Amino acid sequence: MKPSLFAGNALRGMLIGTAEVIPGVSGGTVALIVGVYEHIINGISNLVRAFGFLLRGKPKDAGKLFREIRFTILLPILFGMILAILTTASVLEPLLDTEPEIVRAAFAGMLVASLYVPIRLIGKNFRSIHLVILIIGGTAAFGLTSVPNAGLDNPVAWQIVLFAGLAVCALVLPGVSGSFFLLAVGMYGPTIAAVNNRDLGYLGLFVIGAIIGLLSFAMVMKWFLDNYRALTLSLMIGLMIGSLRALWPWQDQNREPLGVTDPTVPVIALLLGAGVVSLTIGLERYLRGKAIQ
């Protein structure tokens, strides 16, 4: 593998991993933006099917599926994700405490700009039914982001595995923030602390749950994208729009919206966040165009 190719995919993985740590921002959305979403979905799906063939005593069919997995793309992405999660957690934890309005505003700008990706993928196929699905997704996300904190400050083993499995589905479903889900059930703080403190017991249980959730949900998501692509993308757009409720800069400790106070710096942060994502999308399209030529 060329060093430049490894570095490029590792950088994509770092962007995805950073998003996975940020409440309200979806790792799946970032995977869409940087152009590796379908590689991840197809790779996970082929991995699950390959193990299924092995269990049924069909090693040739399993080997064929293994060879179709783009490990030269997926392994650097995984490396970048792990590196980003370990480093971002230590930086983000104090920022969320000291500058929550600015951080949420920047994340909101990123999310708004990233709406371009699924909208472009639908293109001219958008119909009235897609608008209905979009509204349903937006309403559901708005409702979910209004759910009070469930208070799992000291989760037990089965809770760590279960909620990790649900949260990691955000990597498969753009528009859904796994970190925000953890925040909603009260597990975000303990999970960030476990990463920063290298709590291997907690992290081991979390990884088990994440693997189970990722392997199972990826198959479902791939089927919907293969058979109902425009409808699925419409749902993603709705979820992304609805999740903006979680990123209103001015909130109290119970996530209830507050009035605007001194909007100057948050607005600048929002524009910068949107600019970073727009630049990423533009760069990705430019690099793709160069690769095709």
Image (cartoon, rainbow, N blue to C red):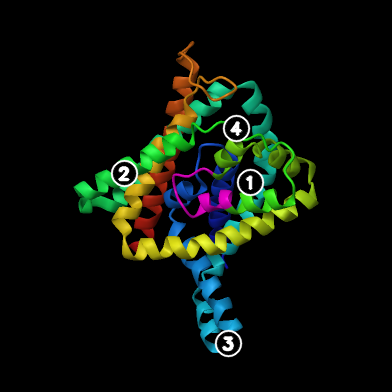
Name the quadrant containing residue 227: bottom left
Looking at the picture, how far across and down is residue 255, in whole percent? Answer: 54, 25
* Segment tinted magenta in the rendering: 166-177
Helix or strand or loop: what does disc 4 sit on?
loop
Earlier sequence position, callout 1 versus callout 2 = 1
Q: What amino acid does circle 4 point to?
A: Asn
Q: What amino acid does circle 1 point to?
A: Ala
Residue designated by label 4 = 149
Mark-to-mark CA distance, 1 and 4: 26 Å
The mark closer to the camera, 3 or 1, is: 3
Looking at the picture, how far across and down is residue 32, in whole percent? Answer: 43, 51
Residue designated by label 2 = 134
Helix or strand or loop: what does disc 2 sit on?
helix
Mark-to-mark CA distance, 1 and 2: 31 Å
Residue designated by label 1 = 84
The mark closer to the camera, 1 or 2, is: 2
Earlier sequence position, callout 4 versus callout 2 = 2
Residue at 69%, 45% in the rendered image = 86
Looking at the picture, how far across and down is residue 94, in whole percent? Answer: 68, 28
The mark closer to the camera, 3 or 2, is: 2
Helix or strand or loop: what does disc 3 sit on?
helix
Residue at 48%, 25% in the rendered image = 269
Q: Taking 54 as reference, is 123 above or below it?
A: above
Earlier sequence position, callout 1 versus callout 4 = 1
Q: Which mark is residue 59?
A: 3
Q: Is residue 238 left or right of residue 63?
A: left
